[in-house]
Image (spheres, rainbow, N blue to C red):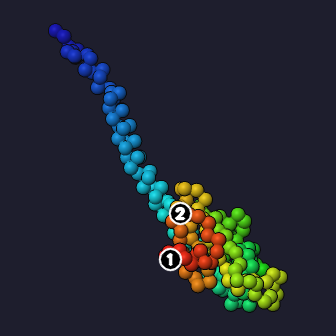
Amino acid sequence: MFTGTHNPNPKREQNQGGFSLIELLIVVAIILIIAAIAIPNFLRSRMAANEASAVENVRTITTAAVVYSSTWGNGYPPTLDSLGGPGTSATCDLSNLIDPILSTAPYTKSGYVFSYTGQSGTAPLGGGCTAPGFNGYLVSTVPQSGYSGTRSFCSSEPGVIHYDVTGSAITSQTTCNGLPSL
């Protein structure tokens, strides 16, 4: 009498050990479909977050320019650098009003490049200041690449933030104020 086990189909036992090539290809195809759906959504949400950060930074620079003007009596700041500083003691030239990332060249944050220009002529030189400020200003920001955002933003002394859907640089108060506001 036979006491061992007998397998009537030895091929069936061999095939049950792993996945077939077709099964693996189906899994890979499903993963690729999910990635094709998720990655564009991720990029859009990242661009929206960068644009929101850029708007908030324009708002911060606008507020800092107004604070600078009322604190130092030198008009609006002469440069974006004068709104920053080392963080120890504030002076007219380094007022410590904004993040050093925004007040130090190349003036980039969250995929946007920021610029600040004085407008409407120079103001009378304030006490303790080495450079005169301006009677007006324009702060603007443009996206660095297609992945950081698509719109550019600007603001001037009325404090209203405007945007340009083309992402172009905004070079004057008139152009800025003619754009749609947020």
Nearest the eye: 1 or 88: 88
Dot 2 surroundings within 10 Å: few (below 14), some, or many (20 or more)?
Answer: few
Compared to 138, does 111 lie above or below?
above
Task: Describe the element under mark 2 as helix, strand or loop.
Answer: loop
Residue 70 location (% of width, % of height): 68, 90
Q: CA distance from mark 1 to mark 2?
A: 14 Å
> At 67% across and 80% down in the image, what residue appears?
137
> At 64% across and 68% down in the image, what residue appears?
114
Q: Quadrant of residue 88?
A: bottom right
Tell which circle, 1 or 2, labels the residue nearer the N-terminal end.
2
- Asked if the residue under mark 2 is in contact with the one under mark 1, i.e. CB atoms within 8 Å, the reply is no
Dot 1 surroundings within 10 Å: few (below 14), some, or many (20 or more)?
Answer: some
Check disc 1 and report the residue beneath it: 181
Asked if residue 114 can be seen in this view, the reply is yes
Residue 24 location (% of width, % of height): 36, 32
Task: Describe the element under mark 1 as helix, strand or loop.
Answer: loop
Asked if residue 50 can be seen in this view, the reply is no
Residue type, numbered disc 2? Thr
> At 49% across and 60% down in the image, what residue appears?
46
Residue 98 location (% of width, % of height): 66, 76
Q: Which mark is residue 166?
A: 2
Q: Quadrant of residue 29?
A: top left
> At 33% across and 35% down in the image, what residue appears?
26
Q: Quadrant of residue 127?
A: bottom right
Residue 62 location (% of width, % of height): 62, 80
